[in-house]
Image: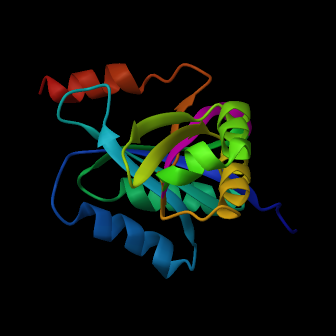
Amino acid sequence: MNEEIKSFTISVYTENNIGLLNRISAIFQRRHINIESLTTSQSEIENVNRFVIVVNITESQASKVVKQIEKQVEALRAYYHTDDETIYTESCMFKIKSDLLFEEPQIQNIIKDSNARIVTVNKKFFVLEKSGRRNEIELLRRELNVFGIMQFVRSGRIAVTKEEMKITEMLAAFNNQ
C-alpha cells in the first residue's frame, strides 16, 4: 500500500540542552528524510523550547519519526500536523540597490502588490521584509530577481495548530517539578 507523501509540520517541545539539535537531525538523516525547514524558539512555557520542523513524508513515516524523537531524554513531547491543521508563515528579507527604488517605478508596484515593507533605506541599498507563505515569498523573489538582489534570506516555518493542544498544561506541570 502506497501512502501519499505530504508536507508535515513536526513540533518538538524540549529542554534547552547542547547537542539536542544534532541528535534530532540525525533521526531524519538515518531515515533519509530531508528537512525542508527547521526553526527553534522559546515555547509558551518558560525554559521549554520548541522546534518546528517541516518535512515531506508519508504519515506513517511522520508517526515513526515523532516516536523516535520522543525517545530523546530532553524531548518532552513531539507532534506532527498536516498543513491543513496548522496556521503557518515564513519571513524573508531582500537587500537591493537603493538607486533602483527611485529609478524603477515597477519595483515600487511590486513592493505594494506583495505587501512587503521597507525596513531600511540608505544611499547604497534598501531592505525589504515580507512575511507569508513560501509560494508568496518565492513569487516576490522571482519578480525582484530581474532587478538584481544583493542578498536574500528566508526563515524557516513558524506554526501554531488550529486545534487546541493540551501541551501547555502538561508543560506547566513539567516546569513546576
Residue 170 placement: quadrant: top left
- In the displayed structure, 150 sits above or below 53; it is below
Residue 49 lies in magenta, yes or no? no
Residue 41 placement: quadrant: top left
Residue 129: image location, x then y, percent: 50, 40
Residue 152: image location, x then y, percent: 50, 60
* Residue 156 visible to the viewer: no
Which residue is situated farthest in the front direction here?
A: 103
Left or right placement of residue 138 versus residue 15 in this view = right
Q: Quadrant of the N terminus?
A: bottom right
Q: Which residues are magenta?
A: 84-96
Residue depicted at 45% across the width and 47% down the height: 126
Q: Nearer the viewer, residue 55 or 166?
A: 55
Residue 88 lies in magenta, yes or no? yes
- In the displayed structure, 104 sits above or below 175; it is below
* Residue 82 visible to the viewer: yes
Residue depicted at 48% across the width and 65% down the height: 150
Left or right placement of residue 131 versus residue 138 in this view = left
- In the displayed structure, 164 sits above or below 25; it is above
Residue 144: image location, x then y, percent: 66, 55
Q: Nearer the viewer, residue 43 or 153?
A: 153
How many marks the image carries: the answer is 0
